[in-house]
Amino acid sequence: MSKKRVLTGYRPTGRLTLGHWFGNLLNMLELQESHEAYYFVADWHALTSDWQDTHAIRQYTEEMVLDWLAAGIDPAKSVIYRQSDVPEVAELAMYLSMVTPMSWLERVPSYKEQREQITEKDLGNVGFFLYPLMQAADITIVRGDVVPVGQDQLPHLELTREIVRRFNNQYGELVPEPAALIPKEGARVPGTDGRKMSKSYGNAIYLSETPEDTAAKVMGMLTDPARKLKTDPGNPDICPLQHMHKLVGDAGDVAEWDRCCRVAECGCVPHKRALTQDLNAYLGPFRQRRTELAARPGHAWEVLADGASRVRPEVVRLMGAVRAAMHVDAERP
Ligand code: TRP
């Protein structure tokens, strides 16, 4: 029985965090065993919002690939490629745009939300408006069967399904309709300030940062705000330190920190030191592989080139069929 094809992409906008590790990477590792995995760097999608400052996209592309590889995404199992190395995606997006009413794109909730909330960037460009349409092309161009998506991306996938139906209806069954794969709820990782970990909140622990950086961030972490003195009993249920510790620490140790906090036997500072140690130990093997990979100049680009060479033949075949069905190939009548 052939495996289903899973596809997901990430915009190269920064190094990956502990939040990505528990929220996405562990899931991607499982999926590369059970599925035919297609993981791509969505560098064109990064342009849609960051078109005024594109200088870091190449660097972040490389870093994202190194982060994936160090985490165990294996080029022998997964096809790792870069969106812009498959420029036919733009052509397919253009064809898909023919069957897509403008109102469908205007309705996408994340579009309206981001236009309202993100004020420091100019998002009035057509490219940003086309974001979900390009996403539909990303998925269909490699015949993705399933796409792991969080709640916020569900409307994008629903839109892709509608576009695919309309396209196939018009020109024949050219591409499969993808299904959403709602991943097992990945652990929600608190940032150092207790809010959800996010690069844009400045509260993130990066997988590839130094143990010293991690130590400094953990020592500055928020704990139960009601616990002013060591002699005050604390509430670990609302303590970001304890939430993070549960993810990376030994269960027995973590239970002991829970107990001694509630009865005010131990303070937050030694607990921070313990978490620092456990976190750095947990990330140690990743960081070592990451350092080794980074010492091989050009390695990430070789992996991407290899991925592109695996994707391209099927893309060329599909696009041939699409052009023929739309009567825009060179076939004489
Ligand atoms: N929207 C994704 C993000 O915000 C990136 C992305 C682009 C994507 N195309 C995709 C995800 C296709 C899944 C499938 O990072």
Image: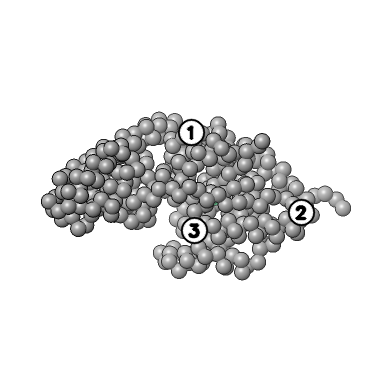
Would you say residue 174 is visible in this rendering?
Answer: yes
Crowding around mark 3 (Cα neighbors within 10 Å: few <14, some 14 to 19, many 20+) is few
The label on residue 172 is 2
Q: Position of residue 250 (x, y in %)?
A: 30, 37
The label on residue 152 is 3
Give the residue pinned by disc 1. 299
Query: Looking at numbered disc 2 in the image, what kind of residue is underneath it?
Result: Gly
Looking at the image, tell me whether mark 2 or mark 3 is earlier in sequence order.
Answer: 3
Q: CA distance from mark 3 to mark 1?
A: 33 Å
Which residue is rendered at x = 18% and y = 42% of the image? 270
Q: Position of residue 121 (x, y in %)?
A: 44, 63
> What secondary structure is marked by label 1?
helix
Q: CA distance from mark 2 to mark 1?
A: 41 Å
Number of marks: 3
Looking at the image, tell me whether mark 3 or mark 1 is earlier in sequence order.
Answer: 3
Quadrant in the rendering for residue 194: bottom left
Circle nearer the viewer, 3 or 1:
3
Which residue is rendered at x = 65% and y = 46% of the image? 143
Near-viewer residue (126 or 52): 126
Which residue is rendered at x = 66% and y = 63% of the image? 100
